[in-house]
Image (cartoon, helix red, strand yellow):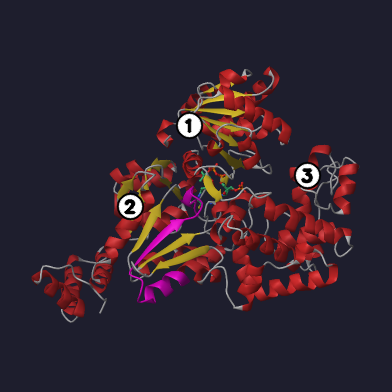
Amino acid sequence: MKLEDIKTIAVLGAGTMGHGIAEIAALAGYRVKMRDISEEFVKKGYDQIAWSLKKLVERGSLSQEKADAALKLITPLVDLKEAVADADIIIEAAPEIMSLKLALFREVDTLSPPHAILASNTSSLSISELGKATQRPDKVVGMHFFNPVVRMALVEVIKGEKTSEETMQLAVELAKKLGKTPIRVEKDVRGFIVNRILIGPYLFEAAWMVSRGEATIEEIDSRMRYYENFPMGPFELQDLTGIDVGYNIMKEAGLPIPPIIEQAVKDGRLGRKTGRGFYNYRDGGAQYSREAGARFDPLPLYALMVNEATWLIENGVSTAEQIDLACQLGLNFPEGILRRADHIGLDKIVATLDALYAKHKLDRYKATALLRQMAQTGQSFYQRSAEYKTLKVEIDRKTHVAYVTLNRPQRLNAINAEMRQELPKVLDELGKDPEVRVIVLKGAGGKAFSAGADITEFTQGKPYQFVELGEFFRAPELCPKPVIAAIDGFALGGGLELALACDFRLASKRSEVGQPEIHLGLIPGGGGTQRLLRLVGPSRAKELCMLGDRISAEQAAQWGLIDHVYENETFEQEVRAFAEKLATRAPIAVRFTKEILNAGANCSLDAALLLEREAFALLFTTEDMVEGVNAFLAKRKPEFKGR
Ligand code: COA
């Protein structure tokens, strides 16, 4: 089966996860059969979808027509046979009880068409075991969505022992089609990637520390939130998701439970949903001061999470990059756990684990062989990009193309103060690197190039700092090498302004661009008004800046704002091909072209022609010119060296 052959998706379960999956499937244009065991449950799920679509419309993320169309695509059902009989893929989102899921898989296997894929949204149960309950284990796969499904970008796609590569790829493609970022989990280990790193090494370890009297709940939460920049501390997080969730997973796995968690579950203090957890939500909820975290040392928590992540790499479950992306998108961890490990230093992490092991003699404190070996040989998980918190830099030395990824996917790559420091530095370095000829700027996470300046900083800065903000956007223009903005998703506000300062703007069909600052009572501050004026003329520039509406990539291309629009599926390849082709051209001549065209746009024709003449004559002194002419005469392809 190919992605295009999928027309009908059955979602089993209309609860929190089920109705969310049904909603995004309908939004992607699929016919959806949403089934639960009673009329009451399906109705509740259906009403929640209607509510959520209404919210999206109110927020301006969706048009009323699209919301209506999506709702029409969903059929709520109670009859299982009817739900799955003509489904091409069935996504099970039933409660996390193995016996229940096994029975469901057995039944669905007999009721659904033989070609159908059976996916489970389990967060902790074995895909291999579910596969064994069917006659088609090759077509059984894990698709672990995160709550709330409509908002969370991550999907873990999990391979069971017998899952075929074809099924994996189809699930990956489907997740993308649903607007999500899939991460492949190559083995169905307990907790997969996100929960494996989150629950034991982070949530439970923090609870062990409190249980052992080494720190208080408030100290740890305060540290992680205010100093380590996590969205919230581990105890507040457990209160939010339910203390019983991690408890059940660890209990099921036969792992020891920290006394403070055991006690909370025993007392029925399960978190917000019961009014009390680690904090009392009838009396102010999670409150802790910034000062509380000043002296807590988070290194043991980092050490355990990093150790677990290296276990995943060691066992072929995932790669460093994918693990970090999963942590960013699934947990909102600032730069990903292994990138942070590089910042801390692997030797320090191993020393922390060794000290913990010496003290407690527990297996979970044993450093993995991979981590120890990397620390001993002075390695890091990332080479160059380890220096940057908000960017990923990869250089393909064979093709001479550098890829710079704006790497804050959890904030749709919004440009914050750190990124404003880092990007000009990177472009400056790449500008000087003799092996780099072309730079591609792109966004992480599959949803956005960048959704603009980080709005959360807007109420904090001083006016003079916003002047500096404007300067940042000149960086691609000032770089001596061509910079391509590869727009896949949103390029809004500062995101679009950054792209406007690049030499080329290539976009995927699904992309949307715009200058929404007017909705914040602002105007574009990074050159948006002026670069747009020069690109699309005064009327369209005014329309974009005054109305603040988003326009499609195709419309932007018609207006001359985007240079090329490519199909979503082939976008990456097309960008690569464009960049690599550009990198084969004579580097010095390319540089001069950029400089004189940029300068020429701002000066008189006489001055610009003079610039062109000078540059033209100067190129006669280059070895590349001799190579170009010789290659032409010898009827071969030139090989330029940039000399
Ligand atoms: N600054 C800071 N955070 C931003 C951001 C920005 N410019 N754009 C998006 N985010 C954050 C969201 O707040 C959200 O964070 P949360 O998960 O903690 O709530 C996360 O990124 C995901 O965005 P979300 O709004 O949930 O995604 P969506 O698909 O519903 O909508 C957009 C996408 C781009 C339409 C919407 O995020 C948006 O309008 N962003 C602001 C764009 C803007 O005005 N830019 C100009 C700034 S000068």
Which of the 4 quarters of the picture holds residue 37? top right
Left or right: 229 as drawn, with respect to 220 = left
Determine the residue positioned at 32% across, 46% down: 565
- Residue 290 to residue 376: above or below: above
In reply to whether residue 442 is colored magenta, the answer given is: yes
Q: Which residues are magenta?
A: 425-452
Closer to the N terminus: mark 3 or mark 2?
A: 3
Near-viewer residue (16 or 92): 92
Residue under label 3, please give it. Answer: 252
Residue under label 2, please give it. Answer: 574
- Residue 209 to residue 386: above or below: above
| Local secondary structure at mark 3 | helix
Question: Mark 2 near mark 1, Cβ–Cβ under 8 Å?
Answer: no
| Local secondary structure at mark 1 | loop
Q: Residue furthest left?
A: 633
Left or right: 547 as drawn, with respect to 503 = right
Residue under label 1, please give it. Answer: 63
Can you tell me whether the CB of the residue at mark 3 lies under 8 Å from the nearest atom of ligand 1? Answer: no
In reply to whether residue 565 is colored magenta, the answer given is: no
Nearest to viewer (mark 3 / mark 1): 3
